[in-house]
Image: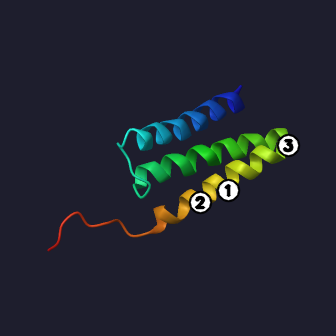
Amino acid sequence: MLGQLLSLLGAGMVLLAYLAYQRGWLGREDRLFNGLNAFGSGLLAFVALEGGQWGLILVEAAWCALSIPPLLRPPRRLWRT
């Protein structure tokens, strides 16, 4: 039951990030976009570990790993001082 809830939460986060990107609400460098992708795909990979679903683990772990570097970059300044 908890695994199902976590997987639904993770899938919802990834899909929300995709929707926001497609609609132009978020860009690929936005922290929220990458945070939703990293956390959502991390949840999905975690749940897939329990079931031994190696293909899903690989895809979600890679998705998570690719979303982390933009989160580690310093935030962009919106204006110059």
Figure coloring: rainbow
At 46% across and 36% down in the image, what residue appears?
A: 19
* Residue type (three-letter) at the residue carrying disc 1: Ala
Report, in whole angstroms, how far the alpha carbon at label 1 lies from the one at label 3. Answer: 16 Å
Residue sitting farthest toward the right: 52
- Horizontal side of residue 3 vs 18, given as left or right: right
Task: Work out whether 39 lies above or below 79.
Answer: above
Q: Secondary structure at mark 2?
A: helix
**Image quadrant occupied by the C terminus:** bottom left
* Residue type (three-letter) at the residue carrying disc 2: Leu
Q: Secondary structure at mark 1?
A: helix
Q: Provide the residue designation for mark 2.
A: 66
- Dot 2: few (<14), some (14–19), or many (≥20) neighbours within 10 Å? some
* Residue type (three-letter) at the residue carrying disc 3: Gly
Task: Give the x, y percent position of residue 74.
Answer: 38, 70
Q: How many marks?
A: 3
Residues marked 2 and 1 touching at CB (< 8 Å): yes
Task: Give the x, y percent position of residue 61.
Answer: 69, 53
Report, in whole angstroms, how far the alpha carbon at label 2 lies from the one at label 1. Answer: 6 Å
Q: Residue 30 occupies which quadrant of the picture?
A: bottom left
Residue 20 circle label: none
Residue sitting farthest toward the top: 1
Q: Secondary structure at mark 3?
A: loop
Q: Residue 8 occupies which quadrant of the picture?
A: top right
Report, in whole angstroms, how far the alpha carbon at label 3 lies from the one at label 2. Answer: 22 Å
Q: Provide the residue designation for mark 1.
A: 62
Residue sitting farthest toward the bottom: 81
Residues marked 1 and 3 touching at CB (< 8 Å): no
- Dot 3: few (<14), some (14–19), or many (≥20) neighbours within 10 Å? few
Residue 52 circle label: 3
Along the viewing direction, whichever of 79 and 43 lies nearer the viewer: 79
Task: Give the x, y percent position of residue 72.
Answer: 48, 67
